[in-house]
Image (cartoon, grey):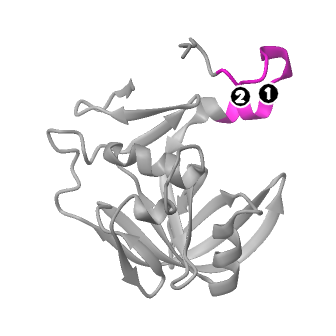
Amino acid sequence: MTIHSSHPFASPEPERDPSRRFRGRIGGVVTLWTAGSDDRAGLTVSSVVVAGGEPPRVLALLDPDSDLAERLLETGLGLVHVLDWRHRDLADAFAGVAPAPGGPFRTADFVDHPHGPRLASAGAWAAVVLEETREVGWSLLVTCRIEEVVIREDDDGGADGAASPLLHLRGRYRRVDRAGGAGAH
């Protein structure tokens, strides 16, 4: 086995897409979107914006070829979970970049919810209803109305950092430390 200082499959610097490199520097909190009941689907998503208003909405850029996009379009219902530092392996499984024997839904406990499978350990989640979709670049922009929000009282970034938000910046996961700064891991 060889240890690489960089990703062994990354494109050489001159061949990298500048817009992807720019997006990587913006970063974002990692969420898990799920939909479906019998035929469940999920996807790790960090291109997410919450828009306040009456009603509030969440907008996201999804892979239009993903099972999640298909299921969300089919059912019109979904769940958006804010992932914590402890969920980084789960995030990789749903992103399709880590092995998940038996499928990614076997990597954690999920509870049935009318909008889809709910991650039992999520400290914050929202039930959403699909309102609109639009192709934007290579992505599918979805606009969803937020119907229910749950934030656990203990979702405060506890001493072990379990409830620290999982951030994705420049291709790596990071977490916010208790003082509010981001640390690389």
Q: Which residue is mark 1?
A: 18
Is 29 situated left or right of 137 in this image?
left
Nearer to us in this view, 175 or 102: 102
Residue at horizontal 61 percent and vertical 16 percent from the top: 6
Identified at 70% across, 30% down, the residue is 22
Q: Position of residue 65 (x, y in %)?
A: 77, 63
Q: Amino acid at mark 1?
A: Pro
Label 1 secondary element: helix
Q: Residue at x 63, y 86 (%)?
A: 75
Reading the image, the residue beneath label 2 is 21
20 and 109: which is toward the camera:
109
Question: Residue reaching furthest front?
Answer: 1
Residue 20: in magenta span: yes
Query: Please, is residue 134 above or below residue 171 in the view?
Result: below
Residue 153, position as x, y percentages in the image: 18, 62
Task: Based on the picture, tell me whether residue 173 belongs to the magenta stretch.
Answer: no
Identify the amino acid type marked 2: Arg
142 versus 176 height, above or below: below
Locate residue 57: give its quadrant: bottom right
Q: Could you say which quadrant of the image residue 60 lies in? A: bottom right
Do the numbered discs 1 and 2 sit on residues whose CB atoms are within 8 Å? Answer: yes
In this picture, which residue range is highlighted in magenta?
8-23
> Between 68 and 81, which is closer to the camera in this rendering?
68
Task: Tell me, for residue 157, which label it has, or none.
Answer: none
In the image, 128: left or right of 121? right
Q: Residues within 10 Å of mark 2 (few under 14, many from 20)?
A: few
The answer to whether 76 is drawn above or below residue 139 in the figure is below
Where residue 123 appears, as percent x and y from the top left, is 29, 60
Q: Position of residue 74 (x, y in %)?
A: 69, 84
Q: Tell me if residue 28 can be seen.
A: yes
